[in-house]
Amino acid sequence: GGQAMWGGRFATRPADLMQAINVSIGFDRRLADQDLAGSRAHAAMLRMQGVITSEDEAAIQGGLDAIATEIRDGTFPFRDEFEDIHMNVEARLRELIGPAAGRLHTARSRNDQVAVDFRLWVRDACDRTVAQLKRLQGALLDRAEQHADTLMPGFTHLQPAQPVTFGHHLMAYVEMFGRDAGRFADARRRMNECPLGAAALAGSPFPIDRDATARALGFDRPTANSLDSVSDRDFALEALAAATLCGVHLSRLAEELVIWTTPQFGFVRLSDAFSTGSSIMPQKRNPDAAELVRAKVGRLMGSFTQLTLVMKGLPLAYSKDMQEDKVPTFEAFDALELSLAAMTGMVLDLEPVAERMAAAAGAGFSTATDLADWLVRTLDMPFRDAHHVTGAAVKRAEALGVDLPGLPLAELQALSPGITPAVYDVLTPAASAASRTSFGGTAPDQVRRQAALWRERLS
Ligand code: ARG
């Protein structure tokens, strides 16, 4: 290769090592569509403002169309000597249409160009993620509605706590993924300002129309400060923070699938499609997809951390450090997209083992709170005393090797003489769950009500 595009003031070409550390086309080629969209909007605006002629604009737009076709067909020559996607497109444009190509970069810098390209990419990624989150919520809702009555143990400290329903448990994740979608939508709203026209850092002396390019690219308005426009990467950080939180939620659900699918729990069976075998142990049925989803949050948070460290301490305005914004962001959204899709597949396919869950729902004296509440309600006992009496009942049941519903009435009356046979009505897991009718509680009707509200919100 000869001189670089910026080679006017240089006597010799850059060292191979200079090029090796500088080159970004290997990864920023993923901004090709966004780069073309930005250039189309910019060229149209330059013509409207009389900065370039209609003939030059037509040539530029025709060349950009041809390049779009080459990129789509995989015939576009991505070349390292042109460093990045921006100069690769411009160099190709010059080969296709000649000197008019040189007018496209009027009133523009790669600094505002990359800022707009990357914003468009992150904005699309947020939109895709919201759509995927809605699909995952839809899958969870389907299963929650089918299992609004299916009993399972609710845990605290992973110890049996109180019976809940499987539907209620799944609906907890519908809430989490709903907040995640909200965070991506919030980030999108804040990021939706167009930096194009900030040029290198100080703005442009040409009579550009920043509102026109902002509008053409689907932004709400142009950014208000040219220095900030080319040095802000908050929009990506915010999206990565939202991705990290979403990854935390995916990881918790994945962890529960891993636990639930053990023979020890046996609450859930994953489909063959989402299970793997072992090369040595023929009996194995491993939840690898769930494990990998559980692990991906490492990449997500790693990406957020990487970009945070790139940005901290950078003086205004643009520094080349910022080229390191792309790889972590692309990697994070690739990981998130795969995780959301795999989780949706697992949720749609999984088979709850209702008998196992129901049996576990009643184990571990899980209706002890119901006994204490009954003593408060029926015998007007202070809750602290009721808690103590119930603790003694559990101790006695444990000693006799029975569960609470199996504890003879005489044993209960020895602890509190006022107890009547009616107490047994509240000691089954089904009665316990059905009694929790407070707003957002686990009673099947509440679960169905929350599911219906979400159906409405998602439609
Ligand atoms: N490839 C660069 C990046 O991704 C584009 C901007 C380059 N600007 C510059 N002044 N060298 O950040």
Image (cartoon, rainbow, N blue to C red):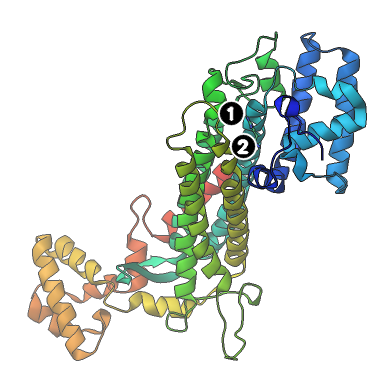
* Residue in the image at 51% along x and 61% along y: 144
Quarter that holds the C terminus: top right
Residue 169 against residue 438 in the figure, above or below: below
Residue 123 tag number: 2
Q: Quadrant of residue 199?
A: top right
Q: Which residue is mark 1?
A: 192
C-beta proximity under 8 Å, tags 2 and 1: yes
Q: In the rendered image, which quarter is residue 287 located in?
A: bottom right
Residue at the extreme front: 11
Front one among 270 and 192 = 192
**Quick one: label 1, few (<14), some, or many (20+) residues within 10 Å?**
many
Question: What is the x, y in percent for residue 91?
Answer: 82, 33
Secondary structure state at the residue bearing disc 1: loop
Q: Secondary structure at mark 2?
A: helix
- What x and y, as percent, mark residue 368? 23, 71
Which mark is drawn over residue 207?
none
